[in-house]
Amino acid sequence: MPLTPETLLDRQRKIRLLVLDVDGVLTDGSLFLGDGGEQYKAFNSRDGHGIRMAQQGGLEIAVLTGRTSAVVAHRMQDLGVRHLVQGRRDKREAMAELLEQTGFAPSNSAYIGDDILDLPAMRQTAIGIAVADAHPLVLEHADWHTRAPGGRGAVREVCEALLAAQNRLEDILRAYLEP
């Protein structure tokens, strides 16, 4: 159930760790497989820049996914994401371990998901976020819904909203306008 605007803003101000699912959040959920079993994923470059802006603004980014993919590892390395947990279908346990490893409290963390596997992780954070095209049950239990669908700007939307709530977005954007 979505939070009131006041409660959401209060929680957004306290977020220090943003945890992302991959398929359906950083991608549109499509899986492309080659004849030899190669796996390909399409990532949105604007979402990637949102991650970079969030890091610049002091947020820590982590990825928690049920699948294991060299493509994901490569993309996260390119983006400077230090916390990557792959191949963990039990996201409740994996999220608890991630919080312990990073030292962040649930009250300072948020999770973006799209499918029912994400619900246990979402429920362990201060803000459970569902992308616009998430499974109906995820939308029902999320604290916040993005306007953008997964793989199409949802991550950027969340990154910018968190930075804005923490009064960091304007300074980051201003740097792009200076001569």
Image (cartoon, rainbow, N blue to C red):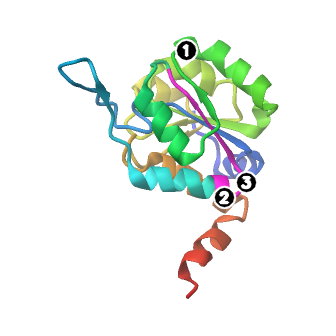
Which amino acid lies under the numbered mark 3 shown in the image of this protein? Gly
Q: CA distance from mark 1 to mark 2?
A: 28 Å
For label 3, the SS is: loop
- The percent coordinates of residue 21 (x first, y second) are 51, 31
**Residue sitting at 40 percent across and 53 percent down?**
45
> Looking at the picture, does residue 78 appear above or below residue 54?
above
Is 80 on the left-hand or right-hand side of 44? right
Q: Which residue is mark 1?
A: 88
For label 1, the SS is: loop
- Whether residue 68 is visible here, answered yes or no, is yes
Is 112 on the left-hand or right-hand side of 31? right
Which one is nearer the viewer's eye here, 43 or 95? 43
Q: Which residue is mark 2?
A: 56
Is 17 on the left-hand or right-hand side of 31? right
Which one is nearer the viewer's eye here, 10 or 54? 54
Q: Earlier in the sequence, mark 1 or mark 3?
A: 3
Judged from this view, the residue extending furthest toward the left is 35
Which one is nearer the viewer's eye here, 140 or 62? 62
Q: CA distance from mark 1 to mark 3?
A: 27 Å
> Looking at the picture, does residue 46 appear above or below residue 33?
below
In reply to whether residue 174 is colored magenta, the answer given is no
Q: Which residues are magenta?
A: 55-65
Q: Earlier in the sequence, mark 1 or mark 2?
A: 2
Q: CA distance from mark 2 to mark 3?
A: 5 Å
Q: Which residue is mark 3?
A: 58
- The percent coordinates of residue 60 (x first, y second) are 69, 44
Q: Which mark is residue 171?
A: none
Q: Are marks 2 and 3 in contact (CB under 8 Å)?
A: yes
Is 79 on the left-hand or right-hand side of 69? right
